[in-house]
Amino acid sequence: MFKMVNLSFNAVSFLSVCVLYSVLYHRFDSQEARIQMPLAFLLWVTHNNAEMTTVDPPNIAMTSIMGNWPCNSAKKANTGHIGTKSIQSLIMVPEVSEYIVMAFCFLFNLLSAVKRLPEHIQVDDPAVVRKLAKKLERQQIPLRSDYGYKVSLFSHLHQYSRKAPLTQQISIPATVIHPSIVRLGLQYSQGIVAGSNARSVALLHAFKQVIQDYSTPPNEELARDLVNKLKPYISFLNQCRPLSASMGNAIKYIKKEISNIPSQYKEEEAKKKLLSCVDSYVNEKITLAAKGISKYAIDKISDGDVILVYGCSSLVNHILCEAFEKQRKFRVIVVDSRPRLEGREALRRLVNRGIRCTYVLISAVSYVLPEVSKVFLGAHALLANGYVMSRVGTSQIALVAKAYNVPVLVCCETYKFCERVQTDSFVSNELDDPDDLIVTRKGKTHLADWQSETSLGLLNLVYDVTPPDFVDLVITELGMIPCTSVPVVLRVKNVDQ
Amino acid sequence: MDEGELVEYFRTQMSQDPDVASAVAAIRSLLEFLKRDQSETILGLRENLTKAIGRLQEADSSVAVSSGGELFLRFISLTSLENPDLSQCRNMMIERGELFLKKISLSRGKVAKLCHTFIKDGAKILTHSSSRVVLKVLESAAADKKRFTVYVTESQPDSAGKHMADKLRKLNIPVTIVLDAAVGYIMEKVDMVIVGAEGVVESGGIINKIGTYQMAVCSKAHNKPFYVVAESFKFVRLYPLNQQDVPHRFKYKADTLKTAEDLNQEHPIIDYTPPSLITLLFTDLGVLTPSAVSDELIKLYL
């Protein structure tokens, strides 16, 4: 009789789990989660019938599940041991509580498997690409196609061509996207507006234009409708050129400000408030922050210093010009790299001020470092684990500087601090046009038809990450902090907001 | 109370109680200054206090006096001073000042309690120059019936190591004095290095008697743990990048700064040890890794 009850109970639960599983199958974000649910159920079933069979199967199943749990995967060997001991003690406990424990594991597994992961670019996963295409179709934004052969390690990133202007590659619906956003997108895709501060400021100015030209449709609330209007613009800009971390933070701020507009505000008042918010953001986080950072940085520049800078960072150039005006005696070595050759712009700006400069390419950095006393680097973003994301080549400079015991100072405003965690430059980066690497020397262009060569790939990376051990000091407008204190600043900022 | 009297009071405090930290003596003098201050406004009071701190720094150029003074000023003003009656405000500030003084007088005991458990039976400890906090730590370890031997460096130019050795002998701890130049030689024999600090900087590094940096580099090369014991009032808002970046007012004694013609000819009395060479810092706020010091500093100063 007991056996019959058990069997029917098993059958009913098996059927219900099957139904549940098929319904939720597509919500599972990983293969692991898909396997764990039936495994957990299997364990439950075998344990149910444990009195008839040996005790071993549940143990093995339980340890395998413990091993597969994502949080324990790093300590697989250990959890096996500890897991079995605790599970054995659990198994000794009377049956009803065991079912509760099993059900709890089951549910916990279910819930953790259905958690939403943050969006990562995954161009090599067709399901994700299809989802993105559907989203863009809904928003009436054209999808931009990738160009050329991608190196397999970076095949999950987009690679666009810059040869033909964007308007020839995709048809931009003028009715859906505001003209200033179209202009901005074109400027981004052609590289006319480049550099994280310049891009953020241009974005905020374009948004100001959008807000000014916006009029609330009848039966809609400004707070919600304007945010929805901004979403297709952001997708479009993302298609033109992937958004930077600073732009992401600026967009988050604007969306928050818009949704915080009280509903009793009239349209004119609301628009005025939003415009002043945007202005104050640009003023506080970018302009005044630069002034604050130069104040701290100038303290660190002493007379007779030889300062090395890489590429063209608007903030570092600002600091050096300010220091020169405050009568500090120093000279600068500008390091540059192909294919962007941004160092030439920095060189132009510094020489115009009258600062003594030397210009080298990155291949000569170990030759020139023995005479350098400090290295000043700009940053594109500062990640939550203290890693610095900056123009490709920065981590190389930091590494060589560390080898020569030269202090490395990174200057970064706090609005570029982002909650992302990254330990390598592969998982999230940007691929620039590979044709930029083609160069004509003495009338010969060797790589002109690189596409016909099947085993050849050209890689033009834009960013890389520098570990915090290579960075001695980060100068922000809040003060001088070590690289490892970025999460503290993020925490303080969140408390302020 | 004028500045001359303040310095006199400070010096008497230091001579009366040789065991007291210079920062504690400075804070006692500042509290006395606050009690006797005659200014009419809060702003005037703060200005006078800042000037007093500057004057004390001229008298005794250690980092601890500067950091202790600044923390004292912040701590007493960290309360609502909206009261229109100035004497009430002043009384509130004096109360907070007394509270601060009480807290920091207990800090050395807290540090010793945290650190002495790290000294195992049969350990050989190397320390540098004469630090009262390290002495307290070794005292509590000895009181805990642990058996250990201590090597102290002579620490020229003032031979402070010899004082340390005398004090340790009085506690019946076997101690050997080694030359400053013998740190590399002795490092393979010892199990750990414990030093005090005159100041703990924002990066998590320390400023201490000259010769500490050498010891830290040697201990790193031999993979021996390098522990620093310091009270929290020694946390200072400085961020040196290297030895040259430490301000001159800390590097040389106050009298040298006033009388010397060419500072390059003088010997600095302190050096900077970067955080990469330090294993752990024992403070009254807890046992911290060098990267956590910045976190604590932000909490203390902001």
Image (cartoon, grey):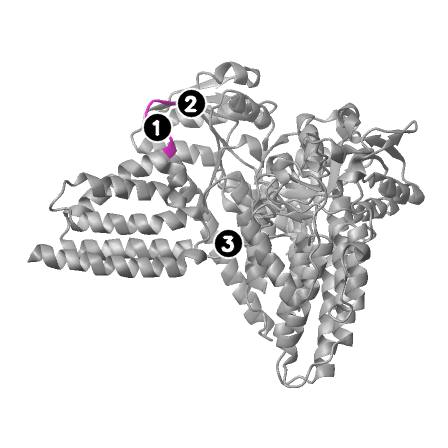
Drawn side of residue B262 relative to residue B203, left or right: right
Residue A338 lies, in percent from the top left, at 80, 35
**Image quadrant of residue A255?**
bottom right
Residue in the image at 88% along x and 32% along y:
A440
Q: Is residue B159 visible?
A: no
Residue B197 lies, in percent from the top left, at 54, 36
The numbered disc on residue B191 is 2
The numbered disc on residue B120 is 1
Cβ–Cβ under 8 Å for marks 1 and 2 = yes
- Quarter of the picture containing the N terminus of chain A is bottom left
* Residue type marked 3: Leu
Residue in the image at 80% along x and 66% along y:
A180
Residue at mark 3: chain: A
CA distance separating discs 1 and 2: 10 Å
Q: Residue furthest left?
A: A1
Tell me if residue B151 comes above or below residue A373 in the rendering: above
Q: Nearer the viewer, mark 3 or mark 2?
A: 3
CA distance separating discs 1 and 3: 47 Å
Secondary structure at numbered mark 2? loop
The numbered disc on residue A117 is 3
Q: Residues within 10 Å of mark 1 (few under 14, many from 20)?
A: few
Q: Are discs 3 and 2 located on one and the same chain?
A: no
Queried whether the magenta region covers residue B231, the answer comes back as no
* Residue type marked 1: Lys
Residue B80 lies, in percent from the top left, at 56, 69
Q: Nearer the viewer, mark 1 or mark 3?
A: 3
Secondary structure at numbered mark 1? loop
Q: Are discs 1 and 3 located on one and the same chain?
A: no
- Which residues are drawn in magenta? B118-123
